[in-house]
Image (tube, rainbow, N blue to C red):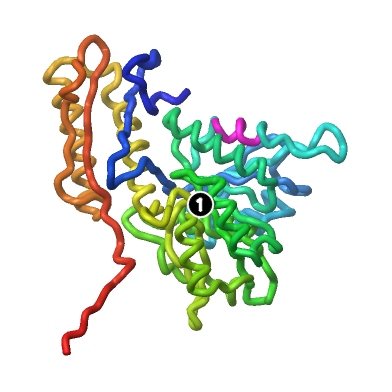
Amino acid sequence: MANGGQWDPISLPKRPGLYINFVERALAQIVGGPRGVVGMPIFEYTGGEIESGEFMTVEGEKAAILAVVKENASPAIRALARGAAEVLLYAVPAPQIPESDYDYAGIREAFEARPFNVFVYPGAVTSTEQESTRDWTARNRKDGKHFTYVTGGSAEDDQDPDIGNARSILLADEYVINLINGAIDSSGNELPSEEYAVDIAGLIAGTPINQSITYQNMPIADTNKRLTNAQTIEALNSGSLVLTNDGRNVKIEQGITTKSTASQAGKIRAMRARQAIATDIPAVAKDHYIGKVNNNRTGQQLLIAAIMQYLETLVLNNVLHEGVYAGMDPERESKGDCVFLVIDGKEVDSMERIFLTFGV
């Protein structure tokens, strides 16, 4: 378990750490998000510098990536092109038994010990593996490790938005993003949503946490399935990420997670802001406070002041609204080596629906 995460008031964690328990409220969901690094397994890497079972981080130059991964380099290149700072590659060992499937549980276990912000497979995986990856994402969230999982479907599935929407409903989670239509590139090649998910992962990783990916133009010629207005509304209500061709550009219709419903939108921007808080505050506490500061009023006020400074920085950068708060938890006594705090803040959203009234 990570040094942090959710805590149960009935059974306090034993390991030293700062434990955050976000309580769902009427207007906010527990969500978190990515900040630069895309984690991606690779299954073909013959002739490259990476060996089976190894990790390697790539960034920047296309030539360097090609040197690392002679085959299947395109997904990493596309993730970086969309804005990811780095791609953390894992060379998946070949199955020990010929013609058997890859050890996906082993892939997830290997990534669990590495820092990254968005996880994506470079291509097709079964619905069972999608569900298992969703569950893995949720379990890590409870343990204090926050990342987003981006997925999609086959070219055939992309032609029926009902199939994609059913997948969104099945994978509903604050940290899961499901693309239901894919891309046609400038050369006329089709990238189904399960492959174009790599580009979405790179875009999310590269977008600042005070910005939205809604209406972000994508550098492709078209989608592999254009949705009608009614189909688009149904997709959004189901928590699906949709590509829309508006006659001029192909854009992301709305930046939402699979947690979005007809009555409440699970926004990627808000999710990433909350994950930043859930990741950064424990990191600062581990570096400067845990084991270093006395658990008395003076030490507690030092910690609170540091958290408030962090939250106010988010306010100044349009991540949170004014009125943030950090203080001692009035419901629980801080004593011994335990400190109970409460923090509060509301995320800033982007303008996405503009309503005009013309007077006559």
Taking the image as shown, residue 312 lies to the left or right of residue 229, namely: left
Taking the image as shown, residue 43 lies to the left or right of residue 205, namely: right
Mark 1 Cα-neighbour bin, 10 Å: few <14, some 14–19, many ≥20: many
Tell me the quarter of the picture where residue 9 sits.
Answer: top left
Tell me the quarter of the picture where residue 279 sits.
Answer: top left
Label 1 amino acid? Ile
**Residue at the location (60% across, 60% down)?**
162
Give the vertical position of 337 relative to 47 (above or below): above
- Residue range in magenta is 107-112
**Residue at the location (45% across, 28% down)?**
143
Which residue is nearer to you in this view: 307 or 333?
333
Which residue is nearer to you in this view: 68 or 171?
171
Q: Secondary structure at mark 1?
A: strand
Q: Position of residue 49 (x, y in %)?
A: 70, 45
Give the vertical position of 63 relative to 232 (above or below): above
Outermost residue to the bottom: 360
In the rendered image, which residue does mark 1 sit on? Answer: 177
Is residue 49 a member of the stretch shown in magenta?
A: no
The overriding secondary structure of the stretch rendered in magenta is helix
Q: Position of residue 105 (x, y in %)?
A: 66, 33
Taking the image as shown, residue 241 lies to the left or right of residue 343, namely: right
Give the vertical position of 128 relative to 197 (above or below): above
